[in-house]
Amino acid sequence: MAYNGTALLVSVDGTALSCETDSSSMSLTRDLIETTCKDATGSAKTYIAGEKGGTIDVSAAYVVNATAGFSEMFAIWDAGTEVAWTWGSTVAGEKSYSGVGLIGDLSNEAPQNDRATYSFTLTISGVITEVVNPT
């Protein structure tokens, strides 16, 4: 069954980026350490799991009076402040993910005769926790 992406939200330091957000994504990675030896069967590579991490990308409308808009993300980026984040469903009984991270990339776009937007990438620092939202 497909899931409506509108129901998946990002929050930064406890403030949901809901109404202005166009899209968000959480991309998780894990380093794979090659362990292939010279006499590998069938010349097949082998690996073991290494460190893991990820990023959260957000694109949002540039709204001047937003509770958590470009100005607030700029302040976080400018200070190099680590922030708490949550990504996922807010529906009771469904899952969401949380942790801390740093905003490494922040940009604006102001096209002619179209709405202004901003975007940022939050790089996850440390452990990612999966939780079931309270009922």
Image: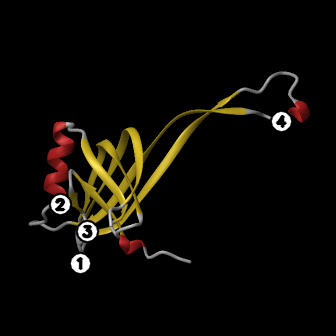
The label shown at residue 7 is none
Give SS at disc 1. Answer: loop
Mark 4 and 1 residues: CB-CB less than 8 Å, in contact? no
Q: The residue under label 3 is which amino acid type?
A: Ser
Residue at the spot 72% in from the left edge and 26% down from the top edge:
35
Give SS at disc 4. Answer: loop
- Where does residue 132 sit, x and y in percent of width and height? 40, 59
For mark 3, does the 10 Å Cα neighbourhood hold few (<14), some (14 to 19), or many (20 or more) residues? some
- Drawn side of residue 7 relative to residue 60, left or right: right
Q: Label 4, label 2: how many angstroms apart (C-alpha)?
A: 49 Å
Report the residue marked by disc 2: 69
Q: Earlier in the sequence, mark 2 or mark 1?
A: 2
Residue 79 in the image: above or below residue 16: above
The label shown at residue 113 is 1
Q: Earlier in the sequence, mark 3 or mark 2?
A: 3
Q: Label 3, label 2: how many angstroms apart (C-alpha)?
A: 10 Å
Q: Label 2, label 1: how many angstroms apart (C-alpha)?
A: 21 Å
- Where does residue 20 sit, x and y in percent of width and height? 23, 70
Q: The residue under label 4 is which amino acid type?
A: Ala
Q: Label 4, label 3: how many angstroms apart (C-alpha)?
A: 47 Å
- Drawn side of residue 18 relative to residue 71, left or right: right
- Nearest the viewer among 11 and 43 is 11
Report the residue marked by disc 3: 18
Q: Mark 2, mark 1: which one is toward the viewer? A: 2
Q: Quadrant of residue 135?
A: bottom left
Mark 4 and 3 residues: CB-CB less than 8 Å, in contact? no
